[in-house]
Image (cartoon, rainbow, N blue to C red):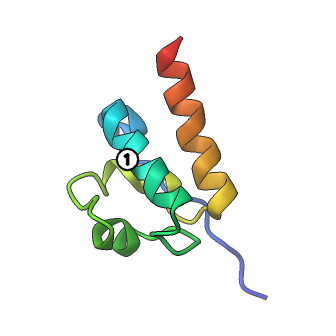
Amino acid sequence: MQSKSLPKFGSRGLTGVDTETLKKLLRALHRGKCRFPVTRGDLIAIGFGDWEEHLSAICGLDERGAQAVIVAVIAERAR
């Protein structure tokens, strides 16, 4: 049985990604544009290559996990 590694967080994590970009990514995930678990290559392939370093926080997550993290960050910023 292989162990899954936890996602590695970049120096600034999702704080380095503006809210509009997070919303675009969330839409892309909802529309099935990305495979799961999320990889850096997938992020680049769906047009988020400029942000992939900051988006490493969602790499390795399944669909529900990736969406939950992004929704939480968007909600926190809206407060």
- Image point 24% across, 62% down: which residue? 49
Q: Residues within 10 Å of mark 1 (few under 14, many from 20)?
A: few
List the single residue furthest toward the front.
31
- Image point 27% across, 51% down: which residue? 51
Disc 1 is placed on an element classified as helix
- Is residue 50 found left or right of 24 in the rendered image? left
- Image point 35% across, 36% down: which residue? 12
List the single residue furthest toward the right.
1
Towards the viewer: 15 or 72: 72
**Residue 45's spot in the image, x, y percent?**
30, 73
Q: How many marks?
A: 1
Q: Label 1 belongs to which residue?
A: 24
- Image point 51% across, 67% down: which residue? 38
List the single residue furthest toward the bottom.
1
Q: Look at the picture and state if 52 lies above or below 45.
A: above
**Residue 7's spot in the image, x, y percent?**
54, 58
Quarter of the image for residue 76 reads top right
**Residue 57's spot in the image, x, y percent?**
48, 50
Q: Look at the picture and state if 13 lies above or below 40.
A: above
Towards the viewer: 60 or 48: 48
Q: Look at the picture and state if 29 lies above or below 21.
A: below
Looking at the figure, which quarter contains the N terminus? bottom right
Q: Look at the picture and state if 74 lies above or below 10.
A: above
- Is residue 45 found left or right of 72 in the rendered image? left
List the single residue furthest toward the top.
79
- Is residue 4 found left or right of 42 in the rendered image? right
Quarter of the image for residue 46 reads bottom left
**Residue 39's spot in the image, x, y percent?**
45, 71
> Which residue type carries mark 1?
Lys
